Every structure is written in C-alpha cells, then in structure tokens.
C-alpha cells in the first residue's frame, strides 16, 4: 500500500510524505504506482520550473516533499496534486491511503 501523509500549517500544505508500493500488479504493470508517480513528478517539476525555490524533496526513503513557498501558482499546483491523490485513493482504496495532520 502507498501511504501518504499531508501536513498542514495555517491551512497550507507544508509537507507531503509518500511511502510504500501499491502492489496492484507486477512491476512495470502497476497502474496505481504509475498514476501516482506521474501526477507527483509532474507537479514537482511544474513547481520547480516556475519557481526553483518553491519546494524541496528527498527521495531516499520514499518521497518527502517540503513546500517552501505558498505563492498563488505553487499553491494551485499543490492543491491540484492533492486533489489527484484523493481521486486515486477513492478509486483504489486498498492501494492508496492518505492521512492529514494539522500543525497549527
């Protein structure tokens, strides 16, 4: 299962942690992993293309994303990413789990 932890501070996403594997199908055929990876990588690349200081990430043990800027464009891209992740969770609840944490 892919586990995603969203951390919010003052109603803004401050970090996203993604760990695990969907195990929906064999490596190379896993549509859940492919969909999730595609939406996350596209969102990271979009943010960094527009503002290279908008976020940082570490992919050593899963994927840890820290949102460093809450400008309008970065916020819209991250909110779109979160919406897509929730759609994947609804479509594949046995393979994707999202938890939110508020640090206010």
Image (cartoon, helix red, strand yellow):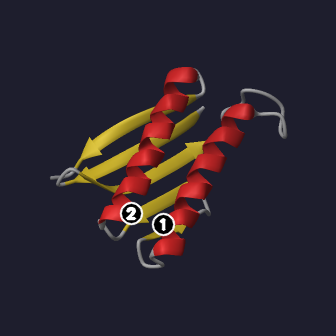
| Marking on residue 47 | 1
- Does residue 16 appear to the left or right of 75 in the view shown? right
Q: Secondary structure at mark 2?
A: helix
Q: Is residue 21 visible?
A: no
Judge the density around disc 1: few (<14), some (14-19), many (≥20) Cα neighbours within 10 Å.
Answer: many
| Marking on residue 74 | 2
- Does residue 6 appear to the left or right of 52 in the view shown? left
Judge the density around disc 2: few (<14), some (14-19), many (≥20) Cα neighbours within 10 Å.
Answer: many
Out of 36 and 58, give the one closest to the viewer: 36
Q: Residue at x 84, y 40 (%)?
A: 28
Q: Are marks 2 and 1 in contact (CB under 8 Å)?
A: yes
Q: Residue at x 60, y 56 (%)?
A: 42
Point out residue 20 in the picture as x, y percentages from the top left corner: 61, 41
Q: Is residue 61 visible?
A: yes
Relative to 25, say whether 15 is above or below. Answer: below
Point out residue 98 in the picture as x, y percentages from the top left corner: 43, 35
Point out residue 34 in the picture as x, y percentages from the top left corner: 71, 41
* Quadrant (top left/top right/bottom left/bottom right) for the N terminus: top right
């Amino acid at each position: 299962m892919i586990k995603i932890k969203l951390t919010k501070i003052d109603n803004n996403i401050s970090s996203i942690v993604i760990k695990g594997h969907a195990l929906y199908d064999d490596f190379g055929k896993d549509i859940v992993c492919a969909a999730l990876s595609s939406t996350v990588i596209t969102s990271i690349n979009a943010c960094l293309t527009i503002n290279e200081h908008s976020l940082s990430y570490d992919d050593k043990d899963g994927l840890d994303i820290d949102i460093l800027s809450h400008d309008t464009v970065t916020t819209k891209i991250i909110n779109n990413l979160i919406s897509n992740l929730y759609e994947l969770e609804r479509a594949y609840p046995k393979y994707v789990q999202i938890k939110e944490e508020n640090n206010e």
